[in-house]
Amino acid sequence: QVQLAESGGDLVQPGGSLRLSCAASGIIFSIRDMAWYRQAPGRDRELVARITSSGSTNYADSVKGRFTISRDNAKNTVYLQMNSLKPADTATYYCNTERGPLTYWGRGTQVTVSS
C-alpha cells in the first residue's frame, strides 16, 4: 500500500522559511518521480515543484528562485525548502507520485503565511 505522509507546515511571517517533508512507503522510492502540489481555498490544485528519479527538477514560475525540491533516497523522503515566503504561498501542500496508471496523494500539510 502506497502511503505519502507530509509534515512541516506551519504559520510563518512573510519573508520567512519552512521546510516540508514527505515520507513515502509502499513504493520503490528511488525510481519514482516525486512532486509537490498546493491548493489554496477556492483555487485549483497546482504543481509547485517536481523532481525526477535522476534528480532533475522543475518549478512553477511563481516559486522559482525561492523554493527548492530535493530528495533523500536513503530515507524515502522528498523535501520542499521554501524561502522568502509570501502570503500568496498560503495553501495546503500535497506530496504526489505516480506508479503506472495510478496517482497517489498524501493528506497534505497546511502552510499559512501571515503577519
Image (spheres, helix red, strand yellow):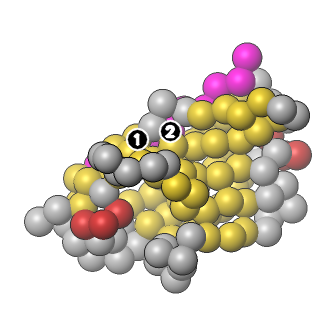
Q: Residues within 10 Å of mark 1 (few under 14, many from 20)?
A: many
Per the image, the residue denoted by label 2 is 6
41 over 23 or under it: above or below: below
Q: Is residue 26 magenta?
A: no
Is 79 displayed left or right of 12 in the figure? right
- 111 is higher (above) or lower (below) than 60: above
Give the extent of the magenta segment: 1-10
Q: Which residue is mark 1?
A: 109
Residue found 49% across the figure and 49% down from its top: 45
Count of numbered marks: 2
Quadrant location, the N terminus? top right
Compared across the picture, whether 58 is left or right of 54 comes to: left
Query: Which residue sits at x=24%, y=61%?
Result: 113
Closest to the observer, 103 or 22: 103
Give the residue type that dot 2 points to: Glu
The Cα–Cα distance between marks 2 and 1, rounded to whole angstroms, is 6 Å
Give, as a three-letter code, the residue at label 1. Answer: Thr
